[in-house]
Amino acid sequence: MSIRETFSRRGAAPAPLAVDFPFSATRDSVGLRTPRALCRDLIALNSTHCLLQIQPFNQEGATHRTHTPCRMADETTADCLFERLRVHQQRAPDSTEVARAITSRINSRLTSHDKHVRQSTLDKLWNKQSGAIQMLLSILENTRDTATSTYITSILREVLCLKQGKGKKSSVNNLARQQCAQHFISLNGSQSVLRTLIATHGKRDGNVGTELMLQDLVWILASLAPRDPKFAMKVKMLGCVRTIHLILKGHFTDNKLIFPLLVIMKQLAKNVVTTSILIRDGVIATYERVLVSLGFIPTARLRLCLDAIDYFSKNKVCCMQIVKTGLSSVLLRVFDRWDRYEGRMRLKICAHILQTLQHLCNIKAGRRALCTKKHVQTLHRFCSQCPDEPEFDGLLARVCSVITLCLKHQALPVPASSPASFNLSPILKGTNTSWPCHEDEEDAANSDSKTFNSDLDDDEPDTDVEADEFPDIDFDEEVKTDANDEDKVHTKSGDSLQNALWINPNERDLEDLKKYFIYFKEFGSYNKQIRLVKSRSNSRGSILEDFLTSQAGSNKNVPSLNLSLTAVLGNTDYDSIMGSSQATSFLQGFHRIHESASTTSCSSLKIHKDISKYSSFAVVYSTISSRVRSVIPFVKVAYPDMMGGQSYNQPEPLNKMERSACRIKLLSCVDRAINPEAYMNEVVYDLDQLCSSNVINTNTDTTSQKSSDSLFLTNNDEQEITKVNCFSSRLSFESRFESGNLRKAIQIGPREYELILMPDVNSNKRHQWFYFEVRNMQSGRPYTFNIVNCEKSDSQFNFGMKPVMYSVKEAVMGKPGWVRAGSDICYYRNSYHYANQKNHNKCYLTVTFNIEFPHSNDVCYLAYHYPFTYSMMMTRIWQWSLQMPSGAYLRAEPLCYSLNNNEVPLLTITAEDTSTNPIVDREIIFLTARVHPGESNASWVMDGTLEYLLGASTAATALRAKYVFKIVPMLNVEGVINGCHRCGLTNEDLNRRWCKPSPVLHPSIYHTKGLIEYLVRVWKKPPLVYCDYHGHSRKKNVFFYGCAGAESWCSNDRLVQDEPVKYLMLPALMHRISPAFALGSCSFRVERERESTARVTVWRHLGVTRSYTMEASFCGFDRGPFKGFHLNSQHLQSVGSDFCEALNGLNDIVTNVDIQLTKDLNGNIIDINLTSAGISSEVAVDSEAGSGSDSVLKTDSDEDFD
């Protein structure tokens, strides 16, 4: 069928077209034809068998045409073509020849040498309003004509594929192509092109037209793949993965197709599912041939090939195939020519190869293939010749990591079992009670009968457990059976022990909550509590009223002795520990404490017994420390803690990393792994050996796990520094004091030591916190300390943080305090491997630093952060109880006992009850801290909070008059005492146990949650604010994590109307009050994996809207007035007092306040403006530099490590 069209030309009558077929090459507005277009026309002509009547081409006329009339005619032609395309799609979908003619003319315009013709046609196609792309897709899906499909694919390639060029016009066109590609993807264009590719590849007829169409389709997919986030899954769903692989196999030497094919394969390699399909299909062998054919010339094709291999190698099966095909050797040959490459291409090529080699080291065969003399020499040669430029530091670190990974496994030179192990069998058998005994002083000694054994044999390494799993505790089947028998827990067959010990958050009975009334004595007598609950519940027969009324006896003030102790003590067999006389004592003691509530201060903590109020801080600290029960016996009191443990209050700038020093240390680590015999290996401190002489008889249940029953712990460091010591060639170490955790020290050089930290109790992992003593040093000489069993993939030591040091001589000379110390600090992977079989291919990391001690023969202490021990907290509570301001109310009492029988204190702080300010009208603030023992900065913040609350200032007085504070200052006392980093005695993260805490294994969490639940469910008065204090090891500054239903992972939370002013008010006040606070680091997301943390549990299960985690950095500040400086203990205490000031202003804000949020481009809140009227809005601005995390991973303290 012939097509006739007329074009209006200025000054000439309409004329017919010069040909009778749609592939016009005449002297009209289309212009000159490209060879590729002419070839495509001839192919289409051959398929349709049309007879051509071509008029002679007048080159001269084409040269001398008038441009302005042609442009006007060109616009008319383009509009006519697209209008006919639209009409054809609507009325004649089966008209093959019409579709072929129209698409042919459009294609001829796009391939014309006249740039104005091309540009006008492209503009029409890029315009979404024209609908041209949608029409072409529809025709491509429905047509069976090869010529039409060929034209459409050619059009789409011109429209979608980016073009290389210079100038503004080229940039504008490429931007339009990118936008058109996104529109094309939204129209399901990727699926249409993939289906066409499958059909075209299935023909395999050897036709030139089919081959050209295949090229166009591949280029189209290459332009879509990087922009379509679901591209790989679309390819998989359409069954096109093997098709693309087959095309690569057949065209890996085709210069026209190899680049787009590599782009497509890279996108498929990023997806786990498509990667598995390709690996089974033998893609590694294909890539080996591709790599050989590409050669070693640094091109974009080589980079794409290596990038895809890097992604593929994340699969262990792929790693095996890389080894079998010999591709690893080819990769090393490419890497060995690194010095012949230039620019960023060299860095990218080397980075992809080294990442692939790191993945190969995850399997045994890969390590064996790389651990040949030739390959190690190649890698070591790079280390010695690596340019001294910052951009090569990452490559050098990767090469060293590969060398250490592929070498023979080197285990830590310590036994697999830790000396710090705790026998949990008696606890699981039910011989322990965590509920405190409010006993008389004369009966306090009876509590020593509750003792436990220490199990020094840890047969198996513990593993991480999920939030809802029972902990992996080392006990045998006999113990399990006995525990079930003695507790008389009747479970169904097949039920785990977890069901017997763990309590569902919604299943705790109200009868079980009634026992917590004893912790709210500040609200008056029993009858007063009844009236309070009754007035708040607005109903007769309150739970608490029924309970207390039923216990009333002849004496109104004394509860009846018929009170069920079994109900009060929960799930423990209390009768086996305490007799009825002790029960009487407990209730009478409770009555006497209640009667003395009119005094301003009251402490019923057993550890404070018989301490003179005239004693000095050091004496009180030593006395309390001597009464603390520990897993490993202590031999002394640390001098810094005995003296108060403050930092030396001077600005200390962040460390600036010395690249050259770090390179030297990194290469030294590699050299030590290759040539260990060239280094000293003398053990100078071994805690395992020291503990072996003090093995406790585990078969005697009466043996107490405490530091010493008879030894009074002291410190004689001041006497030691006055002695004249002869020169010693080695340092001496000690860590057998509270929170200390050095396990082994090995001298490897004249002034270089490898240090191994203790793991958490009943564990063989979680190493970060360190605290130990050093002596016998010489001044002016740098000593190198390498802590070699760190586990985190990154650390603030790489971003400016220094460890802290305390010098006893400096303190005696009048400059007491912790200071930031150390130089040449860096953090890198070493050659020591995990002992755990599951992680046998993982290596530990080293934090290394040099210390120049200020004095010879000094006694110095080194720590990860400013220590704050359990004894320090108890000593501070004792101090505050003696220094109460007028009108203040403080009560310190044991909330419960830990698993090793140490008290967990609960503090109540408020003002005295008056008629003008009744205590029952005050809101309750609930604060907790130190659930992670390694986060000592949380305790310093809590210390600042308590110091402010118990101060005599007008603001503190007003705050006490406004609120009742319930504070648990240390949730994980066992972890703090024993120098743990993350867990306590059960090898569990207690901040993952808030949903289902066990009263036996997690008493502090169980009873803290019980107190809040008592307020919520019995009193119907939830706390106004709950805040849990934490430390953060990967971010700087101080910030909040809160809970916003609008940002929750749960869709039901997002459906509930949120009140942002409630949870944003406190961060807004902190932002205005505290210079250390960084609003931009705050987050209010509720993530699924955080459901078992304190913050989310209190928000979701207990309905506290203002539920926060306050995070304080271990490092320092990157914004605000302290930017570029370390954070010290005074800063942390100031944050605690600033928090109190923010609480003081919380109720002063009117209720109809609106907020205006200022966010940065990443969505982080950087400012909150409070207004009394209007609508809350968001303003996006650029955030201040440094507001985020230094690490690539942006985590908070609720994650696996922080």
Image (spheres, helix red, strand yellow):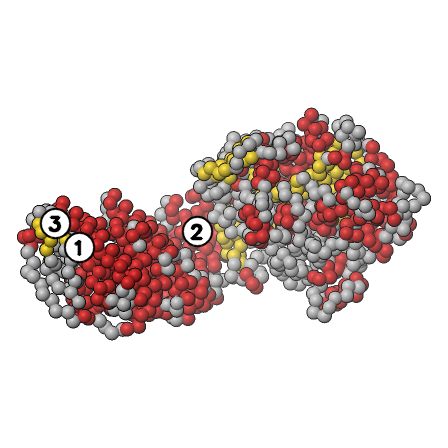
Q: What kind of element bears circle 1? A: loop
Observer-side mark, 1 or 3, equals 3
| Residue identified by numbered label 2 | 397
Q: Disc 3 or 2, which lies upstream in sequence?
A: 3
Point out the residue furthest to the top here. Answer: 954
Residue placed at 49% from the left, 38% from the top? Answer: 1178
Identify residue type, mark 2. Ala
Q: Residue at image x 25%, y 69%?
A: 145
The answer to whether the residue labelled 1 contacts the one labelled 3, judged by CB atoms less than 8 Å apart, is no
Residue 379 found in image quarter:
bottom left
User: Compared to 843, does 819 lie above or below?
Assistant: above
Q: Callout 2: helix, strand or loop?
A: helix
Relative horizontal placement of residue 809, taking residue 1158 as reference (left or right): right
- Classify 10 Å Cα crowding around label 3: few (below 14), some (14-19), many (20 and above): some
Query: First in sequence: mark 2 or mark 1?
Result: 1
Question: Residues under labels 2 and 1: Cα distance?
Answer: 53 Å
Classify 10 Å Cα crowding around label 1: few (below 14), some (14-19), many (20 and above): some
To which residue does mark 1 refer?
A: 112
Disc 3 residue type (three-letter): Arg
Look at label 1 and name its amino acid.
Ser
